[in-house]
């Protein structure tokens, strides 16, 4: 039997998941779907946690959820191009409800990425930079790193400082005393998570980070 194509898999998730949007206005998590996200591992984690979710593919869909996730994997510039093609950028930039970017989704929140010299959403005025070549540090950075919160925030409630989270990335977001919510170190110290108003971003993959990653997703569902 041939493997199910990504479009069919996404339609199956939307139609058959018992945890997708519960039908009211402003309930659950809306996943902004633009063709550059790790949708299936994320939805599997939300289902394990029994957090209601659904897919956002049009501006009208935003009204059905009370918080949002921007997933992302791969090239930040290519992801930005795909997001631009959806026509959803004005709606995203005007969101007032909690919004979480994951991995490349976090990088999209910044102003600029060295990956493809790309202008991004500029919601959080930081830059996404490429790891320098240093002896003993392979790029991409892949594996578990300890994360240390730098500000009090409900996103990290019940998560001890120094907890391990899973990273896969070749570019990092610069550290900022203003916008860095938590930090980690690999070759240099950088933002493991960022925060401005209702916008949050995490460079690591909470859906692949075990109990503390699931705790972070659960915390986000309650912010």
Image: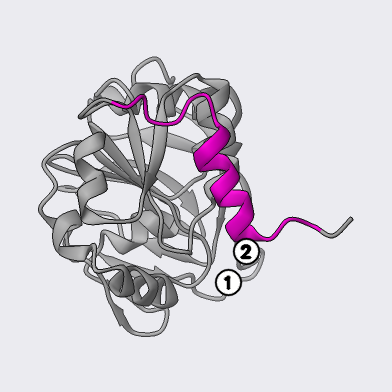
Q: Which residues are magenta?
A: 3-23
Instruction: Count all numbered tags in the image, as a single digit.
Output: 2
The colour scheme used here is one colour
Circle 1: is it few (<14), some (14-19), or many (20+) Cα within 10 Å?
few
Q: Give the residue at mark 2.
A: 137
Asked whether 222 or 3 is in front, the reply is 3
Q: At 58% from the left edge and 22% from the top edge, which residue is drawn?
A: 48
Q: Position of residue 223 (x, y in %)?
A: 24, 24
User: Which type of secondary structure does the marked residue at label 1 adopt?
Assistant: loop
Q: Quadrant of residue 104?
A: bottom left
In this rendering, position of residue 112 left or right of residue 144: left
Q: CA distance from mark 2 to mark 1?
A: 6 Å
User: Which type of secondary structure does the marked residue at label 2 adopt?
Assistant: loop
Q: Report if the CB atoms under discs 2 and 1 are less than 8 Å apart.
A: yes
Q: Give the residue at mark 1.
A: 134
Q: Residue 175: within the magenta?
A: no
Q: Quadrant of residue 190?
A: bottom left
Asked whether 223 or 43 is in front, the reply is 43
């Amino acid at each position: 039997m041939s493997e199910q194509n990504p479009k069919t898999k996404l339609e199956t998730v939307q139609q058959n998941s018992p945890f997708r949007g519960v039908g009211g206005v402003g309930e659950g998590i809306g996943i902004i779907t633009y063709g550059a996200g790790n949708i299936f591992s994320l939805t599997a984690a939300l289902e394990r946690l029994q957090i209601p979710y659904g897919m956002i593919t049009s501006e009208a869909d935003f009204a059905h959820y009370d918080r949002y996730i921007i997933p992302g994997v791969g090239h930040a510039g290519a992801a930005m191009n795909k997001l631009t093609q959806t026509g959803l950028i004005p709606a995203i930039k005007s969101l007032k409800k909690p919004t979480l970017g994951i991995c490349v989704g976090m990088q999209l929140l910044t102003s600029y990425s060295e990956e493809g010299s790309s202008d991004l959403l500029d919601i959080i005025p930081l830059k996404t930079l490429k790891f320098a070549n240093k002896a003993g540090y392979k790029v991409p950075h892949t594996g578990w790193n300890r994360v240390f919160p730098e500000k009090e925030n409900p996103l990290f409630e019940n998560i001890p400082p120094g907890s391990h989270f899973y990273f896969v990335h070749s570019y990092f977001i610069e550290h900022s005393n203003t916008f860095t919510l938590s930090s980690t170190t690999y070759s240099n110290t950088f933002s493991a998570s960022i925060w401005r108003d209702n916008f949050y971003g995490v460079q690591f993959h909470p859906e692949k980070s075990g109990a503390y990653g699931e705790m972070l997703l659960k915390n986000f569902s309650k912010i």
